[in-house]
Image: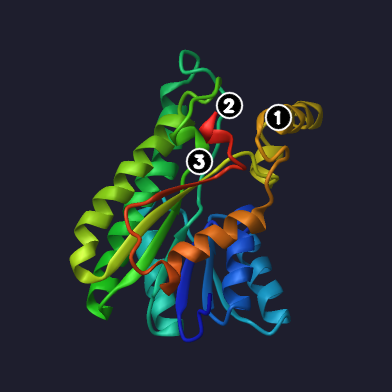
């Protein structure tokens, strides 16, 4: 996968899978605008890339706000001249039963995980159409395909992202815009570690290893490679696809 002369806007690039994707994209020759609601984290990712000889800039972006999404798109175009790839790994997780989920919490999760993806897609599709094409990759979750307890708002938000991906792929296809989605399983990321106490998360890791066909949790870099495959010309005839990256867990 070679991304020389290609530009990515990577939202949620401040940590975890997003950071791994930004670093790998730059290693493969591309320029990347690292965007994150935590601008300091975005800058840290960009600085890591630049120290290794890559090209990167950073900006803050709250995907739930249309003005900030537009600003991130325009900043990317102003700095690098174009947007060939959008990687959307922005997301939040709230661990709570559906029955116990507050309306405000439901709205917050859907606003970031689903509406944010809509706003990003809306913002870049026009740019890509003018350029003659592009690739969009959203980060959903195994929870979009299989249900787990205490994911009352999170699972529905990620399931909606699958249909958003398919709708965008349908509309973008005639213009050379491919839109795909990756569904990670249990990945060793800051989001996962923030979902409970250290002991609770370690118990989840151990439980996952017992039921996952590959017998372990995943690493951010493994998901990043799948994301960049779908963004690359090597996936030139793939659009509207949903790719589980979960060590085979979804087959059970």
Residue 111: image x %, image y %? 39, 41
Of pointers 2 and 3, the one earlier in the residue sequence: 2
Residue 248: image x %, image y %? 58, 39
Give the residue displayed 50% in from the left and 65% down from the top. 229
Of pointers 1 and 2, the one earlier in the residue sequence: 2
- Where 175 falls versus 145 (above or below)? below
Which residue does the numbered mark 1 point to in the structure image?
196
Q: CA distance from mark 1 to mark 2?
A: 8 Å
Side (left or right) of 188 relative to 71: right
- In depth, the one of 115 and 64 nearer the eye is 115
Give the residue displayed 51% in from the left and 59% down from the top. 227
**Element marked by disc 3:** loop
Please rate how many residues cluster around mark 3, counting C-alpha atoms within 10 Å: few if below 14, some from 14 to 19, many from 20.
many
Q: CA distance from mark 2 to mark 3?
A: 14 Å
Which residue does the numbered mark 3 point to in the structure image?
141
- Where 110 falls versus 127 (above or below)? above
- In depth, the one of 8 and 115 nearer the eye is 8
- Tell which residue pokes out farthest to the right in this image: 199
Residue 17: image x %, image y %? 61, 54
The image quadrant of residue 249 is top right
**Element marked by disc 1:** loop
Q: CA distance from mark 3 to mark 1?
A: 18 Å
- In depth, the one of 34 and 219 nearer the eye is 219
Task: Kindly tell me whether residue 60 is visible in this rendering.
Answer: no
Which residue does the numbered mark 2 point to in the structure image?
95
């Amino acid at each position: 996968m070679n991304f020389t002369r290609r530009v990515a806007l990577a939202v949620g690039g401040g940590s975890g899978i997003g950071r791994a994707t930004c670093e790998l994209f730059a290693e493969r020759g591309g320029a990347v605008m690292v965007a994150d609601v935590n601008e300091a984290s975005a800058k840290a990712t960009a600085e890591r890339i630049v120290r290794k000889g890559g090209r990167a800039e950073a900006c803050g972006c709250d995907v739930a706000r249309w003005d900030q999404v537009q600003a991130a798109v325009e900043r990317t175009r102003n700095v690098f001249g174009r947007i060939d790839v959008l990687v959307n790994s922005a997301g939040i997780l709230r661990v709570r039963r559906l029955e116990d989920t507050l309306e405000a919490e439901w709205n917050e999760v859907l606003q970031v995980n689903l509406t944010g993806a809509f706003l990003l897609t809306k913002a870049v599709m026009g740019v890509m159409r003018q350029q003659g094409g592009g690739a969009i990759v959203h980060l959903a979750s195994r929870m979009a395909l299989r249900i787990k307890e205490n994911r009352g708002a999170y699972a529905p938000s990620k399931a909606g992202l699958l249909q958003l991906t398919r709708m965008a792929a349908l509309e973008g296809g005639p213009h050379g815009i491919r839109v795909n989605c990756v569904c990670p399983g249990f990945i060793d990321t800051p989001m996962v570690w923030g979902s409970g106490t250290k002991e609770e998360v370690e118990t989840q890791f151990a439980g996952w290893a017992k039921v996952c066909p590959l017998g372990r949790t995943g690493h951010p870099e493994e998901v990043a490679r799948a994301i960049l495959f779908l963004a690359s010309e090597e996936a030139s005839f793939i659009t509207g696809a949903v790719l589980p990256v979960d060590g085979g867990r979804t087959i059970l």
